[in-house]
């Protein structure tokens, strides 16, 4: 038996009577110091029975702490037979509130597996505690204040399995998450909005026809805005890359020039304002030597300007000019992309009225990927979605 003395206030209503100590563990026997108190607040006069409960507490230095707590059932004049109220131990719990608070604070910065290793609990126990914390802390959106939305998709698992995220464009709070990227996947969100759908003014998205059709069906007053980021990314893949490869193939007999074109992919895709002097110099040489690359690069900048027009009429005029220039260029990949974009013109020019972009949502997607990587993936989708909502509670209006 150890001579270790522990402060009584660690366990309100109980005091240590016996401590067994080994090289890495403490087993502490507690005894009550007062009559049991009913959850209703009354002090009991009679004890029905007593059960010994084994409880894990927060570690003391390098020692794991196990408590043996005599939990009493009392006879209450108002409630009948009830288990006594213990301030530091929840009903039926095998963990003290002190340990639970520690676990919850660690889970805000560490993965479940690491926290389990630190506190010596099973990962499933840690996950259960975290899920309970998230359900408590995630705030229900104020649906009456939602006016503008942004919608996007992200990879949920390998094998082209996706989930859809919908956020408030003004507060950046994640409002909805669902598996899939079809109309059926996002329909429950609009059903949850109910009559609030009529208040939605604008929705920013990529050129996903499923999203578009569902918004048109449920939100009759909303304008769909197609996001600049996705259109420019599509332009890079289908036009710039294709023209760059064609230019490189034409230079098979000039290996240095061909290598110069092949290595120019990133300077062609990168925003000019984000380049350093070396990259700008490389870009200037590349465009000066290749007329087709010069054309598609300049028309990319003209296309981007559509999203920054002062009004919709100006945007339509700029589109008409861009359309004419595209066809005058004679470049097949460019003409094909322009024909694909034409049916989406209304959603492109609407950005002049509602300057919404999903770029903030793209930043969210990067953080979602980080959350997923930290846990090495999630088998429980509901838990994963709670993690995402907790990470994006929204800004104050």
Image (cartoon, rainbow, N blue to C red):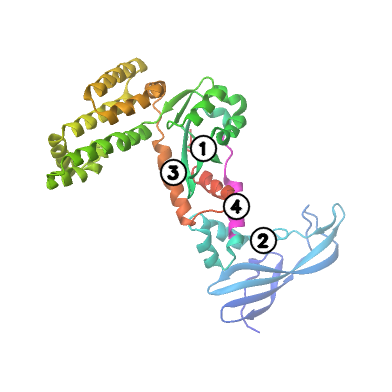
Using the numbered discs, state the Cα–Cα distance from disc 1 to disc 3 in whole angstroms.
15 Å
Using the numbered discs, state the Cα–Cα distance from disc 4 to disc 1 in whole angstroms.
25 Å
Whether residues under marks 2 and 3 lie with C-beta atoms below 8 angstroms apart, the answer is no
User: Which residue is tagged 1?
Assistant: 181
Whether residues under marks 4 and 2 lie with C-beta atoms below 8 angstroms apart, the answer is no
**The magenta stretch spans residue 138:** yes
Say which label, 1 or 3, has the lower sequence index.
1
Which residue lies at the image location 77% right of the left edge and 54% below the top edge?
39
Using the numbered discs, state the Cα–Cα distance from disc 4 to disc 2 in whole angstroms.
20 Å
User: Which residue is tagged 2?
Assistant: 88
Helix or strand or loop: what does disc 4 sit on? helix
Whether residues under marks 4 and 1 lie with C-beta atoms below 8 angstroms apart, the answer is no
Where 201 falls versus 379 (above or below)? Answer: above
Q: In front: 279, or 100?
A: 279
Q: How crowded is mark 3: few (under 14 residues within 10 Å), some or many (20 or more)?
A: some
Q: Which residues are the magenta region?
A: 126-141
Using the numbered discs, state the Cα–Cα distance from disc 1 to disc 2 in whole angstroms.
45 Å
Q: Which mark is residue 365?
A: 3
**The magenta stretch spans residue 260:** no
Can you see residue 287?
yes
Which residue lies at the image location 31% right of the left edge and 33% below the top edge?
235
Residue depth check, mark 4 versus mark 2: number of the one nearer the observer: 4
Say which label, 4 or 2, has the lower sequence index.
2
- x and y, in percent, of residue 277 in the image: 16, 43
């Amino acid at each position: 038996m150890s001579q270790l003395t522990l402060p009584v206030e660690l366990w309100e209503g109980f005091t240590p009577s016996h401590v067994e100590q080994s090289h890495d563990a403490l087993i502490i026997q507690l005894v009550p110091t007062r009559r049991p108190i009913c959850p209703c607040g009354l002090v009991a006069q009679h004890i029905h029975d007593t059960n010994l409960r084994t409880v894990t507490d927060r570690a003391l230095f390098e020692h794991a702490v196990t408590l043996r707590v005599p939990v009493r059932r009392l006879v209450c004049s108002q409630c009948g037979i009830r288990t006594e109220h213990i301030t530091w131990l929840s009903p039926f719990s095998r963990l003290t509130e002190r340990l639970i608070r520690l676990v919850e604070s660690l889970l805000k910065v560490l993965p479940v597996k690491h926290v389990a290793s630190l506190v010596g609990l099973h990962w499933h126990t840690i996950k259960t505690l975290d899920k309970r914390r998230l359900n408590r802390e995630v705030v229900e959106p104020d649906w009456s204040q939602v006016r503008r939305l942004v919608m996007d998709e992200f990879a949920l698992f390998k094998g082209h399995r996706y989930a859809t995220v919908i956020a408030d464009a003004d507060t950046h709070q994640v409002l909805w998450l669902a598996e899939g990227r079809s109309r059926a996947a996002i329909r429950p969100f609009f059903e949850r909005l109910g009559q609030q759908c009529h208040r939605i003014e604008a929705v920013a998205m990529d050129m996903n026809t499923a999203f578009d059709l569902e918004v048109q069906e449920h939100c009759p007053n909303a304008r769909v805005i197609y996001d600049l980021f996705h259109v420019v990314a599509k332009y890079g893949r289908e036009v710039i890359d294709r023209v760059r490869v064609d230019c490189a193939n034409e230079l098979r007999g000039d290996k240095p020039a061909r290598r110069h074109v092949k290595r120019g992919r990133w300077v062609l895709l990168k925003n000019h304002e984000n380049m350093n002097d070396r990259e700008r110099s490389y870009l200037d040489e590349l465009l000066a030597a290749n007329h087709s690359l010069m054309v598609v690069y300049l028309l990319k900048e003209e296309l981007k300007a559509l999203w920054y027009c002062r009004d919709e009429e100006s945007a339509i005029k700029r589109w008409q000019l861009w359309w004419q220039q595209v066809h005058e260029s004679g470049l097949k990949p460019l003409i094909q992309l322009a024909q694909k974009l034409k049916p989406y013109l209304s959603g492109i020019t609407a950005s002049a009225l509602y300057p919404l972009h999903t770029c903030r949502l793209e930043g969210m997607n990067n953080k979602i990927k980080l959350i997923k990587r930290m846990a090495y993936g999630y088998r429980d989708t509901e838990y994963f979605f709670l993690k995402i909502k907790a990470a994006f509670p929204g800004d104050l209006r």
